[in-house]
Amino acid sequence: MAWTAPHTYLADEPLTADQLNNDLYYNMLETMPAKATNDLTDNPLFFYISGNNTIVGRERGYQFIKNIGTRTSFTFGDCTEFVGPTVSLTTGTKALIMWGCQPATTSNSSSTGDHETQMGYTVSGASTKAAEEERSLMFMQGVASVKTHMGFSQWDMRTDLTPGVNTFTCKYRARNFDVANSTGEWRWPTLIVIPL
Amino acid sequence: MVWTSPITFVDGSALTASQLNTMIRDNLLETAPAKSSLDAIGGYFVTEGYNQIGVRKPSLSNVYDTTDESYFIEGQFGDPIANMAKTPPESGPSVTCQTGTTAMVLISTGFLVTGGGTTPVTDPDNQRSLVVGVEVSGATTIPATEKQALVCYSLLPTAPSNTLVFRFTNVQAGHVLWFDNLNPGENTFKMVWKIGSKVGSDDGKATIRRRKMLVMPF
């Protein structure tokens, strides 16, 4: 049952079971404590508006990979050493995705050797979204003979998800403008997804 | 109306319409589902006072320009400016929304800051910087500050020679800012820029693109 506007009671009006069931039974079942059905104390629900007179409790997801990944391709894909981080959870149409790592640029010995690394994400499951440069964490430097590690983070707000169980997975790509088959490096990647 | 503490019912006491309206109708209208609407999907609830909750909605704004170059006033936060007959890119993004005293602001941008070209830079003071901050106006006036900003310095001198052919830094990344001193009401958050450049003929120039801002008021 959905939440309905409560009845206005009048003096001398008979009190009916329907009135009490609508106001005290069904409406109470739509409140936060009634929807607090998750007893996982380490991942409490946050409540969001999901429609007219409707709220929903949603879990957030997180994964950290304590490893260093590499990839030798300028097509978005997985690192050789691992897949992810990956988060699967139930979403509505909206989610805030936040991720970060320490990408490294590696360069050749010429005076150019501009190197670029990107870390984006895909969505699979109820929705299918490809990784995009426009939404990725990007680090590019034009510097010779130097390898630079820097900690960065990025976020994206999606408003185009198909409600259901969606899986978010970080993807990587790298290139050097002067050297074919250049390898990118990403250290200790983290992914957090907050459905709204 | 405000939520009121429910009475304790007593056997033999007459149940009145006033009690039912206060305890059931009015209190139900102060609960989360009563305050939920289609135009606030993705919104969430915060306390606004004793026994009082309110809805807050995240607000997103994008400026997805493809401008190659932008000019800025050196050493001072502001909008992109016209320079050398070039039309400046759109300012912002900015977000206006209802807040309480606190808001989390996420910003993201692509930015390219050039270094000293192909000539080795020997002076560590010759660094080029771009600072991306957020200013608040409306119910609250807070200037942008480098203490809460996304910052890029493009020259990284290396010891011992301090000679490094450093051509540019190009980053697309995000940053999070936290404001806990807002005046409740309608506040406007705007992304602003400050550049510091002392190298070559490119003074005041940087490239910005794919700018976005998300404000989550509390």
Image (cartoon, coloured by chain):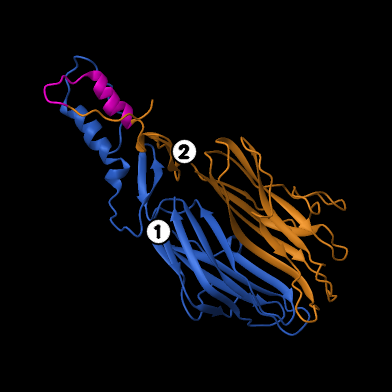
Chain colours: A blue, B orange
- Drawn side of residue B129 relative to residue A136, left or right: right
Of residues A77 and B17, the one nearer the viewer is B17
Percent x, y of residue B174:
60, 59
Q: Residue at x 71, y 83 (%)?
A: A108
Residue B213 visible within the image: yes
- Which residue carries the number 1 mark? A126
- Drawn side of residue A5 relative to residue B214, left or right: left
Label 1 marks a residue whose chain is: A
Whether the magenta-drawn stretch holds residue A71 is answered as no
| Amino acid at the residue labelled 2 | Asp
Label 2 marks a residue whose chain is: B
Q: Nearer the viewer, mark 1 or mark 2?
A: 2
| Most distant residue in the top direction | A12
Of residues B190 and A136, the one nearer the viewer is B190
Percent x, y of residue A153:
57, 63
Residue B67 bears which disc, if any? none
- Which residue carries the number 2 mark? B39
| Amino acid at the residue labelled 1 | Ala
- Drawn side of residue A84 relative to residue B89, left or right: left
Q: Residue at x 56, y 79 (%)?
A: A71
Task: Identify the image quadrant of residue B15.
Answer: top left
The residue tagged with tag 2: helix, strand or loop? helix
The residue tagged with tag 1: helix, strand or loop? loop
| Most distant residue in the left direction | B12
